[in-house]
Image (cartoon, rainbow, N blue to C red):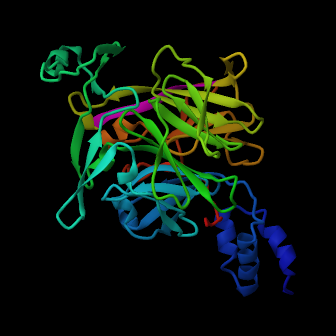
Amino acid sequence: MPQLPQDILMDIFATLEIPDLVRVGSVCSSWRSAYTALRDHGQYKRSQTPCLLYTSESAGKNTVCLYSLGEKRSYKVTLPEPPIRSRFLVGSSHGWLVTVDDRSEMHIVNPITGEQIALPSVTTIEHVKPIVDESGLVQGYELSRHTARRVYYRLSDPEHLKLHVNPTFDKFEAIGKYEPTEYMVYYPDQRRTLALAELREYLQYKAFVFPDEKSKGSYIVALIHNPMNQLSFSRAGDDKWIWLPPYTDYEDCSYSDGLLYAITLRGAIHAFDINGPVIMRKIIMGMTLDRLTDCTYIVHAPWGDLLNVQRIVDEEDANVGSSEHVLRSTTEIKINKVDTRAKKLEEFKCLDDHVLFLGHNQSLILSAKDHPHLKANHAYCTDNSYLYIHGFKNNRRDIGIFNLESNNWDELVTQPRSNWPPPMWITLNLAKMN
């Protein structure tokens, strides 16, 4: 066949999603040239259907599997060292995974381009202090329990309170009721000593990579971390994390028009302007939930609304007495429009022709018309319960397609063969970072 001009090839290739685009770039030299030009010149704008990213022991320690919802098949992608199966996965957004290695240090990695970037050391986070040996090498960490307001210690059983009211703590402040089954005890600052790999079991909760709107090819990383789900961030090229006190209990983040948004477990929404010489915080919405939900998400809808999404999960013990057989299943998802003027929530009854993606990824709403392989008015969910994921690494995950009208589950065609690291959605991206 006569060869088509490169500009025509690029127009055709621009209609393909990334798995198909990468394949056509391997057909011949002229197609490769068109694919490379489309990728490198920033002309590829095709909206992507998220893939389910998971690992498999049989695939190898450096390999991730990407399950395509459109093709109903998995692809295998090899990632750079260290082995992905030895890392913790704490987030994905805009095509980037956020990982934590066995020294508790973080990287972002793009599975499609293979690009990997080290983030600032965890020792620059406000609550982490390195423990070094005589030669200056880091051998462990001290993790503080302090917040901007007070030091905390959480108890699940009020009968144990008397064990912690120790008169030797001369600056003991108060015992305050936090929930009917949870209490907070406040002490002077306490630090917990942790091994290199042990810190990641406690510190990193959820992380996000957002394109920096002020600089093409640059990025911002937001990190929700313990103690008590506080918030820090860093930019490309930074050598430290910047703490955003004083609030706690953050669950999810988004970024829009130069503002970093964060939502708490009780529905409070804060917006941070991190682009000026002084960081400014605005309270968009106070606490709106009377009770704690299992997960709370913040989503910027394509039609311009800001949404508060609540996920209610039921737990079932499939084998009495064995925590290894605790099964979690989402029973309800509530979607609310945030009325920023009236400072109230307006319940959404139906997403119509849109689709929701929830989990340890950036929360998304996509059009089913633009992604015909997806089911309208459904939520595609992966498990993102921090305590459950870290506490029961081998348990079955709360993964599937949730019908928002009937509150019923549709199973994915395939279930991940490995529950650790936790499977999550990722929206593939060919763009490279500066």
- Comparing 173 with 71, the one in front is 173
Residue 303 covered by magenta stretch: no
Residue at image location 56% in from the left, 59% down from the top: 236
Residue drawn at the location 69% of the way across and 81% of the way down: 27
Quadrant of the image occupied by residue 143? top left
Look at the image and give the residue range highlighted in magenta.
325-335
Rendered view: 179 above or below 368? above
Q: Residue at x 66, y 17 (%)?
A: 343
Q: Indicate the position of residue 42 as horizontal and vertical percent values.
A: 74, 66
In the figure, is residue 6 to the left or right of 225? right
User: Does the magenta stretch mainly form a helix, a strand or a loop?
Assistant: strand
Q: Quadrant of the C terminus?
A: bottom right
The x, y position of residue 431, in whole percent, is: 65, 64
In-front residue for pair 39/353: 39
Going by the image, does 296 lie left or right of 257?
A: left
Could you tell me if residue 14 is visible in this image?
yes
